[in-house]
Each structure stands twice: as structure tokens, then as C-alpha cells.
Amino acid sequence: MSAQTESDSRVLPLDIRALMIAIANGRILVPNALVSEIITAASPEPIVGAPAWIRGRVSWRGWRVPLFSLSLLADLADAEPALNAKITVLKALGGNARMPFMAMTCIGFPRLTTVAANELQQTGESDFRGPRPGILTEVLLREDRAMVPDLPAIQALLEQALNLGAAPS
């Protein structure tokens, strides 16, 4: 093995495993490491006074996880389809002990894919006009169009709407 090849093998891989997740009127692309589980949709516990994009709370592994619709938040759809509905449980970012997970409505099971840096292109265009809450950008991965959600912003919106600020130290 040459010195060049040996040093290249120590470089972090440029490929990441990701999930292409169908939502109402679109698809999103998220790193596989952020997804805890895909579960069958259940009727969420309503949250009085919450905005319509917050669907309620679902029970998952002893947690009451806030459930949101990215399609409703980003104004991509007027309603969530009931057919083949699933819930994607995501690891929340930012370390808020009061909300370590959040859940998102989705359609069917996601498709696992490998994302190489040279295969992912920001499109610079979109099917919608102007910025959308919860959407960071739109990308093209090979032949597939997808949106990249702004998960830290979504978490902040959930925390604010549900009054779930970080617990005092």
C-alpha cells in the first residue's frame, strides 16, 4: 500500500447514509443517523392551542413526543393523507432534555440511499415561491428531487409553540 493510499484511507468517508422520506406533496432527505424509528401512524393526543401543523403528541418508548406535519408547516398541503400514513421519530438536535425526540408525519416507508458529495446538487430553484418555514433548501440527488428540512428551526418552533424551553440548570 502506498503512502498516498494509506493516508487516503484515514480520511472520513464522503458518503453518508440518508433516508428519502415521502411527505404530502414532496419528499425530504435526512441523514439516517437522525431517524430513530418509523412507526405506524396512531391518533395523536391533541394539544390545545397548538398551531395546526403540530398534530399533537404520540407515545413512543415511554416518551410523549410532539408530532408535526412538515407539509402543513411549509404550506405544501392543506391536509395530511390518511392512506399509508406513518410517523418518523427523529432525534432532536440541541440537547433539550425536555424534548429529546420529535416526530413527523410521513407517507409509507422511507427509502434508504447513499449520498455521495458529488451526487448531491442544490437546485437553486423550487416548486414553491419564496422561503418556506422548516425547509432549508431543495436538492437533486441523482434523478430525485427532495427538500432538506431545517430541523433545528423546526425544533425551535416546536419548543416555542409548546413552551418547552430547556430546563433550568
Image (cartoon, grey):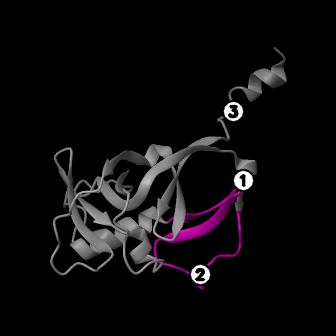
**Is 32 covered by the magenta stretch?**
no
User: Residue 12: which disc?
Assistant: none
Residue 123: name its quadrant.
bottom right
Element at badge 3? loop
Which residue is located at x 40 percent, y 81 percent?
78
**Which residue is the site of mark 1?**
142
Q: Amino acid at mark 2?
A: Phe
Comparing 111 with 147, the one in front is 111
Q: Earlier in the sequence, mark 3 or mark 2?
A: 3
The local crowd at label 3, few if under 14, some if 14 to 19, many if 20 or more residues have their Cα within 10 Å, is few
Q: Tag 2 or tag 1, which sits nearer the N-term?
A: 2
Q: Bounds of the magenta span?
A: 122-149
The residues tagged by marks 3 and 2 sit, at their Cα atoms, a distance apart of 38 Å
Q: In the picture, which quadrant includes the C terminus?
A: bottom left
Viewed as shown, does residue 67 lie left or right of 74?
Answer: left
Q: Which mark is residue 11?
A: 3
Quadrant for the N terminus, please.
top right
